Image: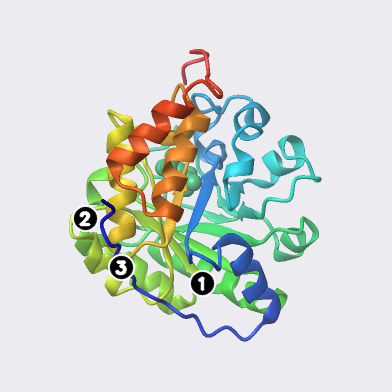
Amino acid sequence: MKTAFVSIVKVIRLSSWGLKNRLSSMIRPETGRSVMLACDHGYFMGPTHRLEVPRKTIEPLIRYAEALAVTRGVLRTSVDPKWQTPIILRVSGGTSVLREDLSDEGLTVSMTDAVRLNVSAVALSIFVGTDHEKQTLLNLGKLVDDGEEMGIPVMAITAVGKELEKRDARYLSLSCRVAAEIGAHVVKTYYCDDFHKVAESCPVPLVVAGGPKLKSEADAFELTYNALKEGAVGVDMGRNIWQNDHPVAMIKAIRSIVHENCTVKEAIEIYNENKSMHSVENSITA
Ligand code: 5RP
């Protein structure tokens, strides 16, 4: 039996038709939910394991995603312009994993180029509570101003750099709320214990990242199920999908939770039924 999902309806009062139209192309109006495929890790992590050749990772999965998150470089080189999936363009950067502090980010793409690339949204990281808090929040303010002018929604990502232990409800509630107050149209954050507190105090739609690959598929399904139940509108997930040996089976199972309210047990069944569809041999380790 399927458990009833808690429904937290968030209506954003948007002035621009273009902005609303782009948002509704990424968050399915029928379900109010979304499976976004995150493939933007290379902008600071370089050739991440199983994202070494982005097109090979993206091509089998893109048809199962409401939106694809990539950088400008991957968009130009590895995404066919004939594909119809909406693009969330990563527009912040300036650091790499070789540095201890990943928070020193600026904007790396102009809104003019984002419009030229015909993207559906732009995304940037904010680093609340770090030495570069102010700079990344001002980046967000500037991007929202430019996005409102051009009709492009802005997704703020509550990044924690290497400090993964920061991801608790107190910190994430603060970060998500700050992002929404500055004007982000969507916020991407992490799932955590008491996630409902994060969702309830954030007045714009929230999606959750998967984070580093979890121990089992069931753990990723549980994260997704709980995040949705507690108020997220979907996932923007990368490594737990494409670092899995069966990425198509994985994304189909995640979709079943997000769009069909499937349970974790049902998602495991869907994963097992679809395992033969596309599998990846172990390749380069990064
Ligand atoms: C990279 C990102 C990723 O898009 C985000 O972390 C989601 O991917 P994953 O599910 O692998 O964590 O923001 O900087």
Q: Does residue 64 appear in this view?
A: yes
Q: Does residue 163 appear in this view?
A: no
Label 2: which residue?
A: 168
CA–CA distance in space, label 1 to label 3? 14 Å
The kind of residue tagged 2 is Asp
Residue 197 sits above or below residue 59 on the image? below
Label 1: which residue?
A: 185
Task: Name the colour scheme.
Answer: rainbow
**Callout 1: 10 Å neighbours few (<14), some, many (20+)?**
many
Residue 257 horizontal/vertical position (percent): 39, 49
**Callout 3: 10 Å neighbours few (<14), some, many (20+)?**
many
Which structural element holds mark 3? helix
Residue 238 horizontal/vertical position (percent): 47, 39
Judged from this view, the residue extending furthest toward the front is 1
Q: Closer to the camera: disc 1 or disc 3?
A: 3
Which structural element holds mark 2? loop
Label 3: which residue?
A: 199
CA–CA distance in space, label 2 to label 1? 22 Å
Point out the tag, 2 or 1, that comes first from the N-terminus: 2
The kind of residue tagged 1 is His
**Residue 194 appears left or right of 275:** left
Residue at horizontal 45 percent and vertical 68 percent from the top: 137
Residue 28 horizontal/vertical position (percent): 55, 63
Residue 272 horizontal/vertical position (percent): 40, 26
CA–CA distance in space, label 2 to label 3? 13 Å
Badges 2 and 3: C-beta atoms under 8 Å apart? no
